[in-house]
Amino acid sequence: MEDVIILGTGCAGLTAAIYTGRAQLNPLVLEGTQPGGQLTTTSEVENFPGFPEGIDGFMMMDNLRKQAAKFGARYEHAKVDKITIENGVKKLYAGEKTYEAKSVIVATGARPRLLGIPGEKEMYGGKGVTTCATCDGAFYRDMDVVVIGGGDSACEEALFLTRFCSKVTLIHRRDELRASQIMADRATSHQKIEMAWNSLPQEVIADEKGFTRAIRVKDAKTGEEREIPCKGVFIAIGHIPNTDFVDGLLDRDGDGYIIPESGSQVKTKFPGFYAAGDCVDHVYRQAITAAGMGCQAAIEAERWLAEQV
Ligand code: NAP
């Protein structure tokens, strides 16, 4: 039986791996479908303390991974579908495989939210609809694209896309951005970015070959509809926590975020069972806060394990 199994290799999971590794707990880290988590799809991380020039998101996660491995973290690919607890032992089911652990840290993060409008699914991934400008932006060189959303992610994606695209229309459902002032100012003052305020996406429209040719939006105030021609639709409307596998086991809120025990950010109702990062935190959702929660969960696990002997 493992002392500690960590689910997820984003900032929270890998920080927990560094701390439990340094505590000689020999953590087993299970990587799901997106090794390295959301930061691997970010271009420049400008706000993580200690990097005055910023750092590439992929590089940062690779560094964390190596740092944890240096202290004894082991990695396996496994997507956990279910967890049960019997006599305090946590049993993890991942397809054909099962794992047993004394303590578990769930740090499975969150995935991009989609709009659920006609055309979105049909053109998602390769035909013009995407959730990752860093991954796909370069495919849209000299083309017109749209970004949907009004938060920091949408502004960041729009600004990133100005490097390649001829024009970026930022479509937001209200007349005021949710993004931080600095990001909002950068986006709204950029000469390649045009704002489409009060615009509700209705449908992604395909050309005769099935590739994106436009998006139809409805004016939230007048109800009037119009088409915005574009080759790419970048959706940046927030995230859904990856927590379905703990349904019925842990308490979750209406959006699926794990609810920690009162008085703690990372403890669940089961001793030795912790949750950290974007699968719990729907308020801050930053690399640094996720890393902080991973650290807290690791220290809690270490102390709890020490009490068990
Ligand atoms: P967010 O702040 O939750 O913003 C989501 C945006 O999508 C909102 O503007 C929302 O509109 C819009 N939206 C949601 N559902 C929609 C729908 N069905 N149709 C149309 N629009 C919809 O998410 P985020 O931008 O991903 O940011 C998440 C967190 O990460 C935030 O705390 C943010 O500060 C942080 N972040 C920071 C940076 C940075 O500092 N560089 C970069 C990226 C993210 P409403 O405004 O009307 O609700």
Image: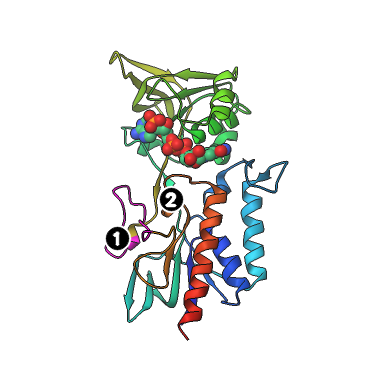
Q: How crowded is mark 2: few (under 14 residues within 10 Å), some or many (20 or more)?
A: many
Q: Which mark is residue 247?
A: 1
Viewer-proximal residue, 286 or 39? 286
Q: Residues within 10 Å of mark 1 (few under 14, many from 20)?
A: few
| Placement of 4 over or under 260, stated as above or below | below
Please provide percent x and percent y for residue 73: 59, 71
Amino acid type assigned to the residue bearing label 1 in the image:
Asp
Left or right? Give the position of 128 relative to 252: right
Are discs 1 and 2 less than 8 Å apart at CB? no
Determine the residue located farthest toward the front in the rendered image: 263
Which residue does the numbered mark 2 point to in the structure image?
A: 281
* Secondary element type, mark 1: loop
Question: In which image quadrant can residue 137 be found?
Answer: top right
Q: Can residue 73 be seen in this view?
A: no
Please provide percent x and percent y for residue 237: 42, 36
Viewer-proximal residue, 302 or 78? 302
Amino acid type assigned to the residue bearing label 2 in the image:
Asp
Q: What stretch is highlighted in magenta?
A: 245-262
